[in-house]
Image (cartoon, rainbow, N blue to C red):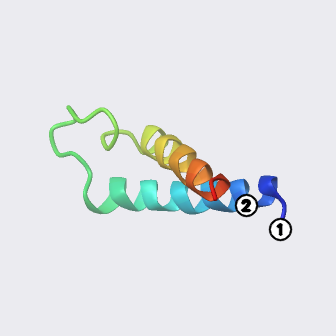
């Protein structure tokens, strides 16, 4: 599997984890910078997932 495919899969899995974290844990006050917004949460965790998938 090429590096790009692994990074895309890792990013998709990370984005799903980020959305689940937003949906089920979230931030009730809105003061949490990552979990208060679903798009920010998905972007951060997609980046983390892509980086973890790329490293060997």
Q: Quadrant of residue 40?
A: top left
Give yes or no for contact between labels 1 and 2 (Cβ–Cβ under 8 Å): yes
Q: Quadrant of the C terminus?
A: bottom right
Name the side, left or right, on which 55 lies relative to 42.
Answer: right
User: Could you say whether the residue bearing mark 2 is in a helix, strand or loop?
Assistant: helix
Q: Position of residue 3 (x, y in %)?
A: 79, 55
Per the rendering, the mark at residue 11 is: none
Q: CA distance from mark 1 to mark 2?
A: 7 Å
**Residue at the image position 51 percent from the left and 48 percent from the top:** 48
Q: Quadrant of residue 7?
A: bottom right
Residue bearing mark 2: 6
**Residue at the image position 80 percent from the left and 52 percent from the top:** 4
Query: Circle 1: is it few (<14), some (14-19), or many (20+) Cα within 10 Å?
Result: few
**Residue at the image position 45 percent from the left and 61 percent from the top:** 17
Q: Position of residue 22 (x, y in %)?
A: 35, 53
Q: Position of residue 1 (x, y in %)?
A: 83, 68
Residue bearing mark 1: 1
Query: Which residue, as the protein is rendered here, is positioned at the far front?
Result: 56
Name the N-terminal-most of marks 1 and 2. 1
Q: Position of residue 29 (x, y in %)?
A: 15, 38
């Amino acid at each position: 599997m090429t590096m790009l495919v692994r990074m895309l899969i890792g990013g998709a899995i990370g984005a799903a984890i980020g959305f689940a974290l937003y949906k089920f844990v979230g931030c009730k006050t809105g003061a949490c910078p990552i979990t208060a917004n679903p798009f920010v949460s998905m972007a951060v965790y997609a980046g983390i997932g892509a980086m973890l998938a790329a490293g060997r």
